[in-house]
Amino acid sequence: MTTGSIPVTCLLDSRDKLGEGCFWDAATQNLWWLDIILPSAIHCLHVATGARRTWQFDEMVTAMARRRDGTILVGAHKGLNIFNPVTGAMTQWRAVDPDTPGNRGNDGACDAHGRFWFGTMMNNIGPAGEDLPITAATGKLFRIAADGTITVMETNVGVSNGPCWSPDNRTFYFSDSMAQIIWAYDFDLDSGTISNRRVLNDSKAHGYPDGATVDAEGCVWSARWEGSCVLRIDPRGRIDRVVPIPARRVTNVCFGGPKLDTLYVTSSRQHVPDVALREQPLQGGVFCFDPGVTGFEKHGFAG
């Protein structure tokens, strides 16, 4: 296991309360991410020029995926919305998990056939951004088809996070942050089904697994909430590398850049103690580093 030795840069001191949901759009060379805490925000940064746009919303937005027409599928507090970057309009599309009104949406990503995998959790954020207790594992994992059909794939989840797939699309990874477990499943791409759940990694030494992505060598890069780092975990579940990040709450990761050889990292500064903010003032920023391996552009939604 290797620790450190990779220079980490703060790409943007964005001071996000709860940065999340990052993805790279290769067609436009834009980095997209969001800030969950109300007023929620979607950010878009053209990395080469520094040109940045931000849109704010009165519903928490928690995950995103590109659509073929240039709009964005947005996972939100109550379900799925469609965001149009040209007009700035956010339109409700599908309710998700309406039978569990105490839940909210969290992380999500698309598989190679463009189905959106979207997780929920007991809502832990109050209207003023205050922390609410998570008292039960009421979260679920949903698979949303292009036509809007919603299928429950997993239940009894504490905090849904980090859906991603191996390069050969034979393994699906999914994290329960509350349980501090990254699960691996057998994945059938044609049918969109998962089976044979087992523990990939359940380390308690590096905080809680949050957002994740997979590199071209099949290793999982896991953002670590309260862990001040990103982990690289090999397909056997062994921690291969620890990359320290100057933020206590590291939330999500994605590959980007012209060669997909940069790892971008979001973070949170909400409720971080003042002494920690003084020690690491860039918390809530977007960071990046050269991981020494290439990755993949995240798949878009087929709908």
Image (cartoon, rainbow, N blue to C red):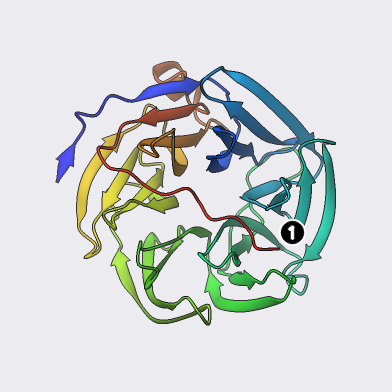
Query: Would residue 96 appear left or right of 247 to someone viewing this image?
Result: right
Report the number of discs: 1
Query: Would residue 295 appear left or right of 233 to someone viewing this image?
Result: right
Query: Would residue 148 appear left or right of 258 to someone viewing this image?
Result: right
Question: Residue 11's x, y, as percent?
Answer: 47, 22
> Can the viewer see residue 270?
yes
Residue extending farthest to the left is 1
Question: Residue 202's x, y, as percent?
Answer: 30, 62
* Quadrant of residue 245 within the rendered picture: top left
Return the residue nearer the eye: 163 or 104. Answer: 163
The residue carrying mark 1 is: 80
Amino acid at dot 1? Leu
Question: Residue 107's x, y, as percent?
Answer: 57, 55
Return the residue nearer the eye: 13 or 137. Answer: 13
Query: Would residue 48 appear left or right of 169 to someone viewing this image?
Result: right
Q: Quadrant of the C terminus?
A: bottom right
- Residue drawn at the location 33% of the way across and 25% of the way down: 8
Return the residue nearer the eye: 69 or 55. Answer: 69
In the displayed structure, 225 sits above or below 238; it is: above
Question: Residue 294's x, y, as percent?
Answer: 32, 43
* Quadrant of residue 55 within the rendered picture: top right
- Residue drawn at the location 73% of the way across and 50% of the way down: 69
- Residue drawn at the location 26% of the way across and 54% of the way down: 217
Is disc 1 placed on a helix, strand or loop? strand
> Can the viewer see residue 125?
no
- Residue drawn at the location 41% of the way across and 52% of the way down: 213
Dot 1, how many residues are within 10 Å of its Cα: few (below 14), some (14-19), or many (20+)?
Answer: many
In the displayed structure, 275 sits above or below 103; it is: above
